[in-house]
Image: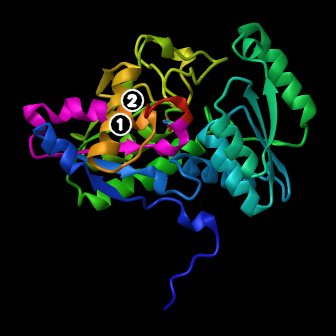
Amino acid sequence: MPNIHSSITELIGNTPLLELSKYSENRSLAGRIVAKVEYFNPAGSVKDRAAYAIIRQGELSEQLKPGGTIVDITSGNTGIALAALAARLGYTTKFYLSDNISPDKITLLEAYGAELVKIPNSEFTDPAFLPVFLERIQADNPDAFFANQLGNPANPQVHYETTGPEIWRDTDGEVAAIVGGVGTGGTISGTGRFLKEQNPDVFVAVAEPGPGSLPTPENPYPAEIDGVHKVSEVEAEFLPGNYDLAIADEVIALETQQARETARALAREEGLLIGTSSGAIVYAATQLAARPEFAGRIIVAVLPDTGERYLSAGTFG
Ligand code: PMP
């Protein structure tokens, strides 16, 4: 039987687990850090899962009509995932983004045919501008489908249905901890909920970048570490709706420099090129792996994307 896929949608998920054996050996870590390498998704990040789930939800609810337009305020991995899937499924995409985002990501969005509307960063981060901005998007695109990754329940749900079960299956139920970051909160909330239902002792840790990464409703993705931000000491109303406040057993703080150094170490020691938020997540996993209670046990670090997306961001020097 030939094993040939006919759409990139069939290539989403079932990403591999890779034990960071050399990295752990070099640091004499007690625990076993196992990376779930999400850059194996077809558009290159964990966001393919949520993007496809959001599109399917739009189709089912008929908010997204055949040939319709998908609109969002993302400029990162969600936009890239939506643009790639939309190309294959016959939709168009239009993203509103701040004019200070990385040229790498703009090039990727344009490669998949997305229409981009750049908003001056001063307006983007001005709380008073948000209602005006949302009204303008609505008025400019009356028939468009809003992906709404921050609040759309299809986002955590797809991690509950796929990422969590894959980790449970591929570790043969031996996962002791998972570590992730929080952008929308979809990954950690959905995956964590599934795994805790299988075994309430599964420990859930969140990697939290430093003080420059306080999210606000107007700027849910502060740029300090692309894709993830602070969750502790942040008022609940400022956190994205898709982050389950009860899911984390521990929040592990770190500096951007530590995330970058960890990403570099993985490139040099494992030959694994991962993004800056992935570096932050492995840094946090390393803290767990150094503890005696995790000796010999499996700590799964869910790594969102590839380092190739950050070559001009300075992560690798
Ligand atoms: N890292 C990167 C690079 C991301 O793009 C995202 C999502 N924007 C995350 C981490 C966080 O994932 P989630 O939105 O599921 O919390």
| Image disc number at residue 260 | 2
Dividing the picture into quarters, in which one does residue 176 lie? top left
Give the residue type that dot 2 points to.
Answer: Arg
Are the residues tagged 1 and 2 within 8 Å (C-beta)?
Answer: yes
Choose between 271 and 200: the one closer to the eye: 271
In the picture, measured across the screen, residue 266 lies left or right of residue 130, that is left
Q: Is residue 281 above or below residue 24?
A: above
Q: Evaluate whether residue 279 shows in this view.
A: yes
Question: Element at badge 1?
Answer: helix
> Is 135 part of what is drawn in magenta?
no
Residue at 21% across, 29% down: 287
In the picture, measured across the screen, residue 142 lies left or right of residue 169, that is right
Choose between 196 and 67: the one closer to the eye: 67
Dividing the picture into quarters, in which one does residue 207 lie? top left
Give the residue type that dot 1 points to.
Answer: Arg
> Is 307 part of what is drawn in magenta?
yes
Label 1, label 2: how far apart the Cα atoms are:
6 Å
In the picture, measured across the screen, residue 181 lies left or right of residue 112, that is left
